[in-house]
Image (cartoon, rainbow, N blue to C red):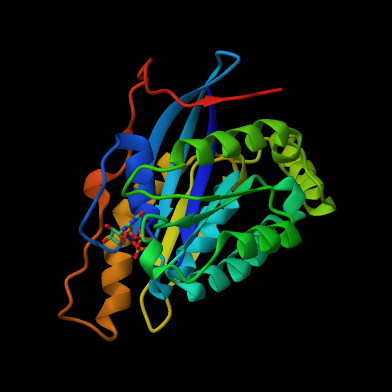
Amino acid sequence: MQTFKVVVLGASGTGKTSLTVRFVNGDFIETYDPTIEDLYRKVIETNRGEHVMLEIMDTSGTERYLAMRDLYIRNAQAFVLVYSITSRVSLLELENIKNYICQVKDRPISQIPMVVLGNKCDLEDTRVVFPEEVEALTKKWGIEDFLETSAKIDMNIQSAYDCLTLQLISKQSFLNGSSNGKDKKEKKEKKTHKKSGSNSSSNTSSSSLSVSGGSNLSISSSCSSNSFSTLSSSLSNSTSSASVNNLNQSQTNSPIRTKSKRSLKSAKVDKNSKGKCLIM
Ligand SMILES: Nc1nc2c(ncn2[C@@H]2O[C@H](COP(=O)(O)OP(=O)(O)OP(=O)(O)O)[C@@H](O)[C@H]2O)c(=O)[nH]1
C-alpha cells in the first residue's frame, strides 16, 4: 500500500490536533492540550478502490518547537495549513509557513500538495476572517484547495483530505522526481557511494536526530528516505530531553507534556467510514 506523509501546520490553538483526531478517530477534543508532535495513521480508499495510507504528523503551533518544523517539512509530501476563522493573525501566519515550505522543498507551490483550512467555522458569532478573502488569497498564492472546517461539528474534514489525496496522486511525479539540480546531484552521489560499497549514512533509511542543550535548540537530521514513524520514534525518544534541555534554560519548574499517548494511532479500514476521493 502506498503511504503518503502529511504534516499539519498552523498557529497555536487553531485546531490542528482537533481536526486530526476528528479525521482519524471521529472524536472531538474539548480541552486544549498544546501539542509537541503526534503521529497518526489512516487508510483511505480512492474511488478506484485503491487503499492509501496517510501518515499525519500533527505539529506544535508554538514558537518553541519551530526547529522541528524544518525536519517535518523536509520529510512530508503534503501539507495541511490551518488557521482559525476567529483569528486574523493565524491566517497571516500561513503566508510565512507556505513560503517556508516552498523554500525547504525547493519547489514551486504548484508542485506541492497543499490545502488551506479555515477551522472553527461553527463559531460564526466570533468570525473575523471571511471565506471570500481567503479564497482570493489562496488563489493568489497558487493553492488549489481552500475549505472552511469545523472539528467540533465535523464539517468538511473528510473533504479536505479527499482533496489532498487527489493532489497527492496527481502531483505524484513531482513527489518522486526531482525538480532541481541539487536533488539530482544528491542522487548521483548516493549511487556513487553504493557502487563503491560505502557505508555512508545517506544510504540508510534511518533518521537520526541530535538535540543539543544550550540556549538554542539545535536539530540536525539525516533522513534520506525515512518515514515519519522512524522520525516520530526518534523524536519521542529525544523530544522529552530536547524539550527539557530547552526548558531548563528558562523554565526549570515547568512540566513538559507531550501528547505521545496518542502517537502512532492507526485507524482501521472501516468499510463504512472510508474516505472516498474521486480520481478522474
Ligand atoms: N468551537 C470550536 N472549537 C475548536 C475547533 N477545533 C478546535 N477547537 C478548540 O480549540 C482549542 C485548541 O484546539 P487544538 O486542536 O488543541 O489546537 P492546536 O492547533 O492543535 O494547538 P497547538 O497544539 O497549540 O498547536 C481546543 O479547546 C479545541 O476544543 C472547532 O472546530 N470549533
| Residue 180 versus residue 191 in the image, above or below | below
Q: Residue furthest front?
A: 125
Residue 250 sits in which quadrant?
Answer: bottom left
The answer to whether residue 223 of the structure is visible from this angle is no
Given residues 189 and 230, the one toward you in this image is 230
Q: Nearer the viewer, residue 223 or 232?
A: 232
- Seen in the picture, residue 64 relative to 211 is either above or below; the reply is below
Please state if 143 lies on the left or on the right of 146 as rendered. Answer: right
Q: Is residue 230 above or below residue 173?
A: below
Query: Where is ligand 1, by quadrant?
Result: bottom left
Q: Residue at x 76, y 45 (%)?
A: 189
What residue sits 77% from the left and 55% below the top?
108
* Residue 112 screen position, x and y as percent: 69, 48
Q: Quadrant of the C terminus?
A: top right
Count of numbered marks? 0
Q: Residue furthest right?
A: 181
- Locate residue 99 relative to residue 155 in the image: left or right: right
What's the residue at 42%, 23% (across, down)? Answer: 274
On the picture, is 85 further left or further right than 46? left
Residue found 48% across the figure and 47% down from its top: 207
Q: Position of residue 95 (x, y in %)?
A: 62, 68
Q: Give the image location of residue 144, x and y in percent.
A: 69, 48
Give how far across and how far down residue 225 sits, in percent. 58, 40
- Residue 45 visible in the picture: yes
